[in-house]
């Protein structure tokens, strides 16, 4: 059978990894796919670099539209990134009846509904395993491996940059700004790390996973997104003393009245496997009604780990290239006419536990007033930790930190209680609030 012809848009870190792994393992991949898979055309603005990367026998062009327009190309692999030209190229490839493989989580999280609808109408596939958690096959697990389950929730460490920073803050007791500079020096963080440290990258990925897990449209604009820039070293230290570690989690939960979709720092019990994922590694926990809890762990970025996912998509398409479109696995796991209209809940309706840190005047009755306000709001306290004044501000200090862990409560209820506590004259600084996930 004639090898399937692939056009590669972008030969950067992931593109070069894809080319090299496909060439290195070509015989094993052919045995699995049932036919050869060949990258025969590459587009990159830096054509000289591209030619050096792919060598002889591959056509290199500077205009990606030439790849999309080539009738010999069966699959277009989009590794350009962003929302602009990448979207146009993907839509043009679909219009030309070409299958698409992409690692572009931002594009799919924002425009996925439009892209998947266009692909469905044309009878082509859009595969995106590499868009979430690099080399971890979490999309295939959710879409196929767990298809018998009603997914109840998922929670993931899905951004290696922020996990590296939090691991370093915990291990070395350093503040965020110091560790960020070190992460940039080591190459874990970009020169402009905004998408990572503000939680946007993780929210793109969580949006895609939530759509597959619950059969809802991709709705990035409905996600609640918080990053790690406001975390202090003392909060990481206090969490540790209480038996928790702080991780940036992407979370999606099924509730009776809708779906929770959120990204934010969370306290996770130290005994949970997810709490012990360190450095730049990624991990996703999924809770299904039949299988229980499953964990997927591995490298979430990098040239060859991400290439592993890109090539897995190429193999899937090669196997199903001639199959009736109606018999293929749907893009978002559920049949397009069977998608759910469950809404994404506003943050005020989210239910979770909380870590609160209050800098208060070191005088009698302060703790009683604070806990009284929580009790009046119907918020149950799980644990209280009070640090001695000299631990906070030195010998003879007149203020101290009170740390409170609560049981699950509605966020809107907690917002109102925090506003009341903040108004107390004995509360001397803005209250720190971090959500808590038991992941039981």
Image: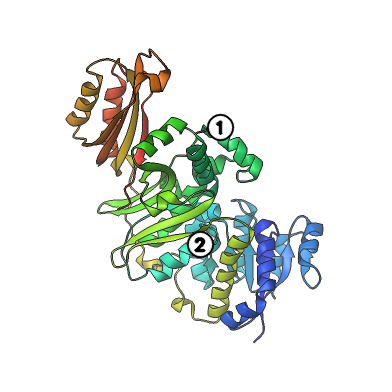
**Visible in this render: residue 265?**
no
| Residue found at the far bottom of this picture | 1
Chain-order first, disc 2 or disc 1: 2
Q: Crowding at label 2, few (<14), some or many (≥20) Cα neighbours within 10 Å?
A: many
Where in the figure is residue 348, as x and y percent of width and height?
Answer: 31, 39
Judge from the rendering whether residue 303 lies leftward or rightward of residue 175; answer left or right.
right
Residue at 52% over, 34% down: 176
| Residue at numbered disc 1 | 177
Where in the figure is residue 265, as x and y percent of width and height?
Answer: 42, 41
Which of the two residues, 156 or 60, is positioned nearer the viewer here? 156
The image quadrant where one finds the N terminus is bottom right
Residue at 28% over, 23% down: 421
Report which quarter residue 294 is drawn in: bottom left
Report which quarter residue 400 is drawn in: top left
Between marks 2 and 1, how big is the CA–CA gap?
A: 29 Å
Report which quarter residue 430 is drawn in: top left
| Residue at numbered disc 2 | 136
* Image mark count: 2
| Residue 98 tag number | none
Residue at 39% over, 50% down: 251
**Visible in this render: residue 377?**
yes
Label 1 element class:
helix
- Residue 323, relative to residue 309: is it above or below? below
User: Do tag 2 and tag 1 residues touch (Cβ < 8 Å)?
Assistant: no
Q: Crowding at label 1, few (<14), some or many (≥20) Cα neighbours within 10 Å?
A: some
Where in the figure is residue 284, as x and y percent of width and height?
Answer: 43, 56
Where in the figure is residue 35, as x and y percent of width and height?
Answer: 62, 82
Judge from the rendering whether residue 147 lies leftward or rightward of residue 282; answer left or right.
left
Which of the two residues, 70 or 196, is positioned nearer the viewer here? 196
């Amino acid at each position: 059978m004639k090898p399937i012809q692939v056009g590669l848009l972008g030969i950067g870190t992931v593109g070069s990894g894809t080319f090299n792994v496909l060439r290195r393992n070509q015989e094993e991949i052919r045995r699995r796919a049932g036919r050869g898979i060949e990258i025969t055309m590459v587009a990159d603005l830096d054509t000289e670099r591209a030619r050096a990367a792919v060598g002889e026998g591959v056509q290199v062009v500077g205009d990606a539209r030439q790849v999309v327009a080539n009738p010999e190309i069966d699959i277009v692999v989009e590794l350009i990134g962003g929302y602009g030209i990448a979207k146009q190229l993907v839509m043009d490839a679909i219009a030309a009846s070409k299958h698409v493989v992409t690692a572009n989580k931002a594009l799919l999280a924002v425009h996925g509904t439009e892209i998947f609808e266009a692909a469905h109408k044309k009878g082509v596939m859009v595969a995106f395993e590499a868009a979430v958690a690099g080399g971890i096959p979490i999309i295939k697990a959710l879409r196929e491996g767990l298809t018998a389950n009603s997914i109840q929730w998922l929670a993931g460490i899905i951004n290696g940059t922020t996990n590296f920073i939090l691991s370093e803050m915990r291990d070395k007791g350093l503040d965020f700004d110091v560790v960020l500079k070190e992460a940039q020096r080591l190459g874990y963080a970009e020169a402009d790390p905004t998408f990572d440290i503000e939680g946007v990258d993780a929210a793109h990925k969580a949006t895609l996973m939530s759509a597959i897990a619950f059969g809802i449209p991709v709705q990035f604009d409905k996600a609640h997104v918080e990053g790690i820039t406001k975390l202090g070293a003392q909060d990481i230290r206090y969490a540790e003393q209480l038996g928790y570690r702080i991780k940036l989690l992407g979370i999606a939960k099924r509730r009776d009245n809708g779906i929770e979709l959120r990204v934010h720092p969370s306290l996770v019990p130290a005994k949970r496997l997810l709490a012990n994922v360190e450095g730049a590694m990624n991990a996703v926990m999924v809770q299904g009604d039949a299988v229980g809890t499953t964990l997927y762990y591995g490298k979430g970025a990098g040239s060859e780990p991400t290439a592993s996912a890109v090539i897995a998509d190429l193999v899937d398409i090669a196997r199903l290239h001639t199959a009736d479109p109606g018999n293929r696995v749907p893009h978002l796991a559920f049949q397009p006419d069977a998608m759910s209209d469950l809404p994404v809940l506003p943050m005020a309706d989210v239910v979770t536990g909380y870590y609160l840190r209050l800098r208060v005047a070191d005088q009698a009755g302060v703790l009683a007033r604070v806990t009284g306000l929580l009790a009046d709001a119907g918020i149950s306290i799980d644990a209280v930790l009070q640090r001695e004044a000299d631990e906070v501000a030195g010998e003879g200090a007149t203020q101290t930190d009170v740390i409170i862990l609560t049981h699950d409560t509605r966020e809107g209820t907690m917002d109102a209680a925090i506003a009341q506590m903040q108004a107390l004259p004995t509360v001397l600084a803005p209250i720190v609030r971090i959500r808590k996930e038991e992941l039981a």
